[in-house]
Image (tube, helix red, strand yellow):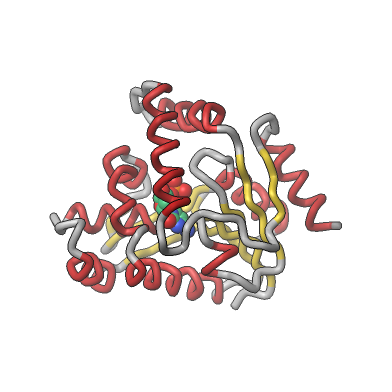
Amino acid sequence: MAKLVITIDGPAGSGKSSAAKLLAARIGAAFLDTGAMYRAATLAAMQNRCDLNDIKQLEKIIDETNFEFEMKSGQMAVKINGSDITEEIRDPQVTANVYFIASAQSLRERLVRMQREIAAEYEKIVTEGRDQGTVAFPDAEFKFFLTADSAQRAKRRAKELTGNGHKVDINKLQEEIEKRDKQDTTRKIAPLIPAADAKLVDTTSLTLEQVVEKILELIKK
Ligand code: DC
């Protein structure tokens, strides 16, 4: 296991991914985007035309796919069976289907195992997701839980998606974010909740720089 593990959990658009990336760069740590892992598993299942309600089929796909996750120019590059799918996993259709993978215990166990294997390769790692402080790394040295109101989160996602050439309807995006919050917080397995020992950071009115400064301040304390 890495000597220093910092977990950053939170809902979609809370800024956890950007904050985790910048924090990792500041302290010279590796960075792991676990949402990208759930997305990659979802895309693998979609490409293989799996029945997304059939856990056995999904287990088989995860077991038989070669996933590669690598930090490249500030972004986590993702490959399945040698093909780069870094952009494709952000497709709204993938986002809508992640739920099937994220709500099944046996599939989550596989991804958590991969996350721990990746962490074991580094001295220091900043890992972000929904269950990093609660399930994947309950003994992490520092745990953070980022929040922000859903209107602000929808604005951030819209900016990200338009930057990638997608057309967006901001109201629909906010509805989708709220739907995903509900799915993530109410699922029986590894729901999105702050770890008891996580520090909460509300990012609604903070810039990325300010979020990272706040996290570094809390670490120093
Ligand atoms: O952070 P993101 O939007 O890329 O995550 C995509 C989905 O993956 C999210 O709706 C919930 C799921 N997820 C999860 O269940 N557990 C994680 N550790 C990371 C993501």
The answer to whether 196 appears left or right of 217 in the picture is left
Residue 124 versus residue 43 in the image, above or below: below
Q: Image quadrant of residue 91? A: top left
- Residue at the location (20% across, 52% down)? 46
Across and down, in percent, residue 100 comes to: 29, 55
Across and down, in percent, residue 68 comes to 38, 64
* Residue 3 position (above or below residue 185): below
Residue 124 picture location, percent across and down:
65, 67
Viewer-proximal residue, 221 or 178?
178
What residue do we see at 35% from left, 52% from top?
39
* Residue 18 in the image, given as x and y percentages of width and height: 58, 43
- Which residue occupies the foreground of this view, 199 or 69? 199
- Please identify the quadrant where the C terminus is shown: bottom right
- Total labels: the figure holds 0
- Toward which corner of the image does residue 202 lie, by quadrant? top right
Q: Residue shown at 23%/65% (left/top)?
A: 58
Q: Is residue 203 at all visible to an observer of this figure?
A: yes
